[in-house]
Amino acid sequence: MTNVKEQFEAAKQAYSKWGIDVDSVLETLKRVPISIHCWQGDDIGGFEVNRGELSGGIDVTGDYPGKATTPEELRMDLEKALSLIPGKHRVNLHAIYAETNGEVVERDELEPKHFEKWVHWAKENRLGLDFNPTLFSHENAADGLTLSHPDPEIRKYWINHCIQSRKIGEYFGSELGTPCLTNIWIPDGYKDIPSDRLTPRKRLKDSLDKIFAVEVNEEHNIDAIESKLFGIGSESYVVGSHEFYYGYALKNDKLCLIDTGHFHPTETVSNKISSMLLYSDQLALHVSRPVRWDSDHVVTLDDELREIALEIVRNGALDHVKIGLDFFDASINRVAAWTIGTRNMIKALLYALLTPNDYLKQLQDEGNFTDRLALIEEFKTYPFGAVWDYYCEQMDVPVKESWLEDVKTYEKEVLSKR
């Protein structure tokens, strides 16, 4: 498309007036991996032989046809989505995506061998893998408590599951040559106002201490812990709050992972990033789109997504923030959901890289708030789309909305026959 090249050259000229080297920006963008969550493809079902009902305050709505029901189908769908997304990325797995050859394997007994096919696939596709222990959809989580459970045997079960998960993460990192982020999220909390907030948190702290006491090679596995404000069934109290986990992460040299849907509706994750980076060299994100609550809608290119990307870029934190996605929508084509959400995350980063951040900082320091606001608003309509189109063309993925035809063909030829 010669028009793409022509529009790109015009955009380069417009941005160059502000000292922005567009070619350099695109080289930077190529080096930023997004960790794409596998669970969009099968509505967080997984492949356990003794599969339980979805629980832990998690709900997936919709019944769009074509859901992946086998590991092979899920990997095929991921490959299709990845072929429509520019750049080289990562795939994020939950423990329930183990492949056990028809055997019932308890989660506290999972081993690297149960993920060998995922590693082989990742090598073939030159992908990194990230990991999460699955502390929901299980009889030992039926009452909404896991690592903070008052029953020591149930706590022990989940402690061992998390230990095994870290070993699996270490295996991923060792085999693939890129460290695996192993993230612990638990649903623990109470529906109504608790009479004791402290003791469950003491139990959670003790469980985490036991989990992290088992050494794994930090060159291959990076530990992260993820907070939440509330969930279905834990509306009044969540044991693993942001304050709890951030304190634990700082004291124990772990990554604090912040999910964009895990806070008050008017509380923004973008506003937290600079503060957290003052005290933590690294942090992790699960980017989602909450609509009134932690509803995990497909990521759109909205104000908060752009602001998150701006905070990462203008603070020189692309190497310090590990960006992952976490949404699940069963009301639309699942391959399209991956494609829309991931392309939007990358678009937001490109938008941030094409902003004259240093000059805008200078204006703020000078107290020139008129020019600052004027330029911020004008840059919203600068030809960022022309640069995006060129980037897609150069990365050999569909330009503009043409990817949608690929998805429709895939749906007709593959998904509709499931």
Image (cartoon, rainbow, N blue to C red):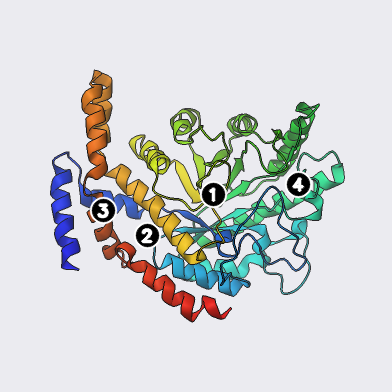
Q: Nearer the viewer, mark 4 or mark 1?
A: 4
Amino acid at circle 2: Gly
Q: Nearer the viewer, mark 1 or mark 2?
A: 2
Q: Is residue 84 left or right of residue 280?
A: left
Q: Label for residue 219?
A: 1
Q: What whole-number distance in Å separates the C-alpha atoms at marks 3 and 2?
A: 17 Å
Q: Nearer the viewer, mark 3 or mark 1?
A: 3
The x and y percentages for residue 229 are 63, 36
Q: Label for residue 87?
A: 2
Q: Nearer the viewer, residue 339 or 130?
A: 339
Q: Nearer the viewer, mark 2 or mark 4?
A: 2
- The crowding category of the residue bearing disc 1, from other C-alpha atoms within 10 Å (few below 14, some 14 to 19, many at least 20), is few
Q: What whole-number distance in Å separates the C-alpha atoms at marks 3 and 1?
A: 38 Å
The x and y percentages for residue 371 are 21, 27
Residue 58 in view of the camera: yes
The residue that disc 4 covers is 159
Amino acid at circle 3: Gly
Q: Nearer the viewer, residue 82 or 371?
A: 371
Secondary structure type for disc 2: loop
Q: What whole-number distance in Å separates the C-alpha atoms at marks 4 and 1?
A: 22 Å
Secondary structure type for disc 3: helix
The x and y percentages for residue 321 are 45, 42
